[in-house]
Image: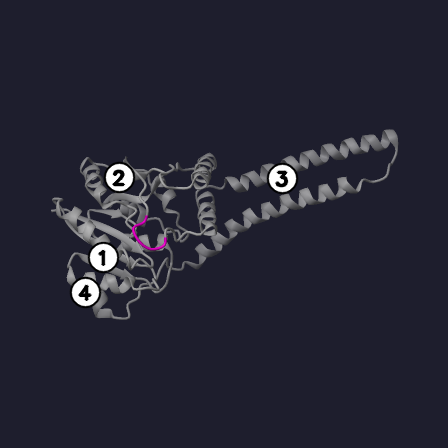
Amino acid sequence: MKLISIVVPAYNEEENISSMYTKLAQELESLPYRYEIMFINDGSSDGTLQEILALSDAHDDVKYISLTRNFGKESAMLAGLKRCSGDAAILMDSDLQHPPHLIGELVQGFEEGFHQVVAKRSRTGDSKLRSLFSSFYYRVLNSITDVDFVDGEGDFRLLSRKAINSLLALSETNRFSKGLYSWIGLSKKIISYENILRADGQQSKWSFGGLVNYGIDGIISFNTKPLRICFYTGFLVLVLSLIYIGVTFYEIMKEGVGAPGYFTTITAILFLGGIQLISLGVIGEYIGRIYNETKRRPNYLVDISNVDEYDEH
């Protein structure tokens, strides 16, 4: 009998862990599969780990990993995928915004032979500003990156063992999973569902700054077009500057030297300075990523303060 792994990253979700397990177990019991539920405590500062430990003691199908600090969702998902042993894995958030009742449909897609079965959510409940920003972001992202992104598709998906192994074969430290899912290819089926608000706890742990940084990661991680844009912009500015110099020289030869214009001078300085700073910033992003990759640091560290307990689970 095949094994299905449920990979659940959790950061400060003590209010939802118990109900999450109950709903998962209800859905999984009805499937003709063995299952394991892998919780990843991503350095929570509340009672999340204690809730997970209690479930692990009471249920043999509950496994867990506890990271030494908050490494972020990307690292937590990677830890779960490395640790799980299922023929397929379903990635889910622990706040119940990923409805467990869709597990049956995800597994059905797996039975049909798809390597990725993706749950695509609607924008119901999101503010108009956030929906507008998201739609604009995905249009920009798809126009400048080398992989395809779909608005509404996130981490809630089933991955076959082949898809899992393909993701684990990618060794980069700076991971942007939405792009990696697309980059590995493989057959995909999409299931749509209505957006669900959080059951308990803080509505979103993503600040505006965090969303902006996440968006920049998506743009930078899968293309070098910003560098090429810098080159084209610099080339265009050079051509325009040469034209301006030629026209100005012609006017001087024809009319003579007039009073230099302060506005023209300061505008040119600010414009060229701005282009240079933007270009240096983009280049700096890539250099920073090269620097991080060369250090070869692990994506996460596991808390094994109790070795016997960790070995058992």
State which region is magenta: 198-202
Mark 1 nearby-residue class (10 Å; few <14, some 14–19, many ≥20): some
Provide the residue designation for mark 3: 234
| Mark before the other along the chain sequence, 1 or 3 | 1
Residue 151 is a magenta residue: no
Q: Residue at 80% x, 40% y: name it.
A: 261
SS assignment at label 1: helix
| Relative side of 75 to 31, left or right | right
| Relative side of 243 to 256, left or right | left
Q: Are marks 4 and 1 in contact (CB under 8 Å)?
A: no
Provide the residue designation for mark 2: 117
SS assignment at label 2: strand
Residue 201 is a magenta residue: yes
Residue 230 percent across, percent down from the top left: 58, 41
Residue 15 percent across, percent down from the top left: 28, 58
Q: From mark 4 to mark 2, how far is it between C-alphas?
A: 31 Å
Provide the residue designation for mark 4: 312
Provide the residue designation for mark 1: 18
